[in-house]
């Protein structure tokens, strides 16, 4: 049952019968004041909370949550949409670009430097090798007071490092204190022993610092592993072997000539890293380096040492510009020694004279002088123009073209055989002999030129050495008036010392020229030895001509009238020739000073070795080839014969005549001499 009451025409609240009214709610049908009391009722006493006393609890009406949920949902949707768009950009649109950037930072690639091939002598003794080395580096930041915990860390560290690396303490201290720098190279190419010393010091200072007994002033010192080219024998054969530059590339001699073979092929290793450390489980990609080829030379270390010692001593004694000695196997063309003086130490190029860095034995072109007369005599004999006993009347002077020619000593008329012309090294006699090579002087010039070319003058030796000079030999139609008569005795043409040596080896080898060689063979990464190709052989003169010339050369050394008596070797027959030529000054292009030389071979009856000695511009003592190069030839040849155990000569040398008796002057019936 429902009771409905009205007051003032407005409907009142509706309630169910029997239901209890809400606490604080006005009774139905009875108006109340805003304070909740009935109109006209007396006010009650004030309560402690206010004049009207405490109010009763009022009802709280909550707002609808749906708008807020919709707003939060929209915000989350926008955030998720942004993430989705970004993921699509990273993983789909720009995936390759981001992958590349990540790979750059994640993957690290290091080059693996190939070991450079070893250069050895003919017995396998190392002349150039590669060893481990370290660059000593430092991080100056770790030497600051804040990091090192001491104010003078650079100075302390420099005092410790300088004696070990051979540097200057003040310079090292400046490097360690370099403002703003994080990397300094303190010393390059140091040995493993040096780095081990530094490591021991680092460990010692680190241990003391951990115990609170001082500062760790070497904490900022590090190393970078490298390889280093070393030359165990110092300056021995430096002109032949050469050197490498700071980048490890061949820059001189055989190091340059064979750089591609010696260098090998570098490899690389690629791995993933994090914070500078390799991730062990990520794997690595490695392309191993292929080591360089080992090269075995024809040089004999002991003979090279003997040659270098002898020429160095004579150059110093003669106060000469330079000198060179070559030892060649007459039969095979192999070069057993090639020594220059002054030389240099390829281990210490900073103190080397730049003028000594080449190989003068093949790079210097000079006028040979009388040693060239051997080729003129070869042409005369091989063409049948004359024999060793042909008589040649040699006047004291000989006017030709616009000059008057002399011999090296003043003399009256000499009555010499052709053998005597060579033994006494007569310029005039050589001119007179060669002018009969043709019916005219022009024809004689062409014949002589053809033999000079066959001996290898004016063309490369075939060695292929960097900077080798082919010499200078103009064609005969370009010879001027004086060259027609100076070229037969070795002036007006030029050659290098190896070309001259090859001329004498050709005669020693029975008239067959063998192309000179420095390389016996190579050993590749597979360990297989590959011999060098056989050298080219060319017949220059007949074997009988070569044998005759050999006997004539013995007269130069064996005869008391010969110019090569200082080259005699007890127990061995020696064939050789002296030379003393006017020298062209490379600075002025004019003749100044002399070129002294001696070339020969032994044993003359069964030739095995050819030795040449050349000294440029001797300024102290004698300048004659026989006097200063003859003893060098003897010293080197004697050592080489003993080293190779060449047996002494078993036969006597032929006694070819030097001169002849012209007899009494012939008279005419009138009694006049003619």
Image: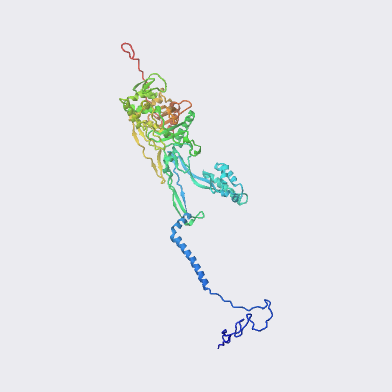
In which quadrant is the C terminus drawn? top left
Q: Position of residue 130 (x, y in %)?
A: 47, 43
Q: How many marks do you count on the picture?
A: 0
Q: Position of residue 270 (x, y in %)?
A: 46, 53
Residue 388: quadrant of the picture:
top left
Going by the image, does 589 lie left or right of 200? left
Q: Position of residue 513 (x, y in %)?
A: 36, 33
Residue 395: quadrant of the picture:
top left
> Is any atom of residue 625 visible in this view?
yes
Decide which of 55, 72 is in the foreground and name it: 55
Decide which of 230, 278 is in the foreground and name it: 278
Q: Residue furthest bottom?
A: 1
Please, is residue 511 above or below residue 245 in the view? above
Please, is residue 647 above or below residue 155 in the view? above
Q: Position of residue 355 (x, y in %)?
A: 47, 35
The residue located at (51%, 71%) in the rendering is: 69
Residue 405: quadrant of the picture:
top left
Q: Residue furthest front?
A: 8
Decide which of 624, 486 is in the foreground and name it: 486
């Amino acid at each position: 049952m429902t009771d409905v009451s009205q007051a003032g025409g407005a409907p009142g609240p509706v309630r169910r019968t029997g239901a209890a009214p809400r606490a604080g709610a006005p009774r139905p049908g009875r108006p109340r004041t805003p304070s909740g009391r009935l109109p006209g009722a007396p006010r009650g006493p004030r309560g402690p909370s206010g004049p009207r006393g405490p109010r009763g609890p009022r009802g709280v009406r909550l707002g609808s949550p749906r708008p807020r949920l919709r707003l939060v949902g929209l915000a989350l949707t926008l955030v998720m949409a942004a993430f989705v768009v970004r993921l699509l950009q990273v993983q789909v649109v720009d995936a390759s670009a981001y992958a590349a950037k990540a790979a750059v930072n994640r993957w690290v690639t290091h080059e693996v430097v190939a070991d450079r091939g070893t250069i050895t002598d003919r017995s396998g003794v190392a002349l150039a090798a590669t060893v481990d080395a370290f660059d000593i580096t430092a991080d100056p930041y770790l030497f600051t007071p804040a990091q090192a915990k001491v104010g003078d860390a650079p100075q302390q560290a420099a005092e410790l490092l300088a004696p070990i690396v051979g540097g200057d303490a003040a310079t090292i201290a400046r490097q360690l204190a370099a403002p703003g720098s994080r990397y300094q190279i303190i010393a390059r190419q140091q040995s493993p022993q040096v780095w081990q010393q530094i490591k021991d010091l680092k460990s010692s200072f680190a241990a003391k610092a951990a115990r609170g007994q001082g500062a760790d002033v070497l904490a900022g010192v590090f190393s970078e592993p490298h390889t280093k080219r070393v030359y165990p024998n110092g300056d021995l054969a430096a002109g032949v072997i050469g050197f490498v530059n700071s980048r490890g590339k061949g820059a001189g001699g055989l190091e340059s000539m064979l750089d591609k073979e010696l260098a090998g092929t570098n490899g690389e290793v690629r791995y993933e890293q994090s914070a500078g450390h390799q991730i062990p489980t990520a794997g690595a990609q490695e392309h191993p380096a292929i080591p360089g080829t080992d090269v075995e030379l024809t040089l004999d270390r002991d003979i090279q040492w003997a040659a270098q010692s002898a020429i160095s001593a004579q150059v110093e004694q003669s106060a000469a510009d330079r000198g060179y000695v070559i030892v060649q196997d007459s039969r095979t063309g192999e070069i057993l020694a090639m020594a220059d003086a002054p030389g240099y130490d390829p281990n210490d190029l900073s103190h080397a004279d730049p003028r000594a860095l080449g190989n003068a034995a093949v790079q210097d072109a000079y006028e040979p002088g009388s040693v060239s007369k051997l080729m003129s005599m070869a042409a005369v004999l091989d063409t049948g123009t004359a024999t060793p006993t042909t008589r040649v009347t040699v006047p004291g002077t000989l006017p030709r073209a616009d000059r008057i020619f002399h011999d090296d000593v003043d003399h009256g008329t000499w009555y010499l055989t052709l053998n005597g012309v060579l033994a006494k090294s007569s310029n005039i006699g050589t001119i007179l002999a060669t002018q009969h090579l043709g019916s005219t002087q022009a024809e004689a010039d062409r014949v002589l030129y053809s033999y000079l070319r066959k001996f290898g003058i004016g063309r490369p030796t075939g060695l292929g050495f960097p900077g080798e000079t082919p010499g200078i030999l103009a064609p005969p139609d370009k010879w001027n008036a004086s060259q027609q008569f100076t070229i037969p005795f070795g002036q007006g043409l030029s050659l290098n010392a190896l070309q001259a040596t090859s001329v004498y080896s050709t005669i020693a080898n029975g008239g067959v020229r063998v192309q000179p060689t420095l390389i016996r063979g190579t050993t590749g990464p597979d360990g297989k030895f590959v011999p060098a190709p056989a050298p080219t052989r060319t017949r220059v003169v007949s074997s009988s001509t070569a044998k005759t010339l050999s006997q004539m050369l013995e007269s130069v050394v064996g005869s008391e009238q010969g110019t090569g008596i200082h080259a005699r070797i007890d127990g061995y027959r020696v064939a050789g020739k002296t030379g003393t030529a006017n020298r062209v000054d490379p600075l002025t292009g004019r003749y100044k000073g002399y070129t002294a030389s001696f070339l020969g071979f032994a044993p003359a009856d069964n030739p095995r070795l050819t030795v040449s000695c050349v000294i440029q511009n001797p300024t102290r003592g004698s300048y004659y080839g026989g006097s200063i190069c003859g003893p060098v030839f003897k010293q080197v040849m004697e050592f080489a014969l003993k080293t190779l155990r060449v047996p002494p000569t078993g036969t006597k040398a032929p006694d070819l005549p030097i001169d002849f008796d012209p007899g009494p002057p012939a008279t005419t019936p009138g009694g006049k001499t003619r």
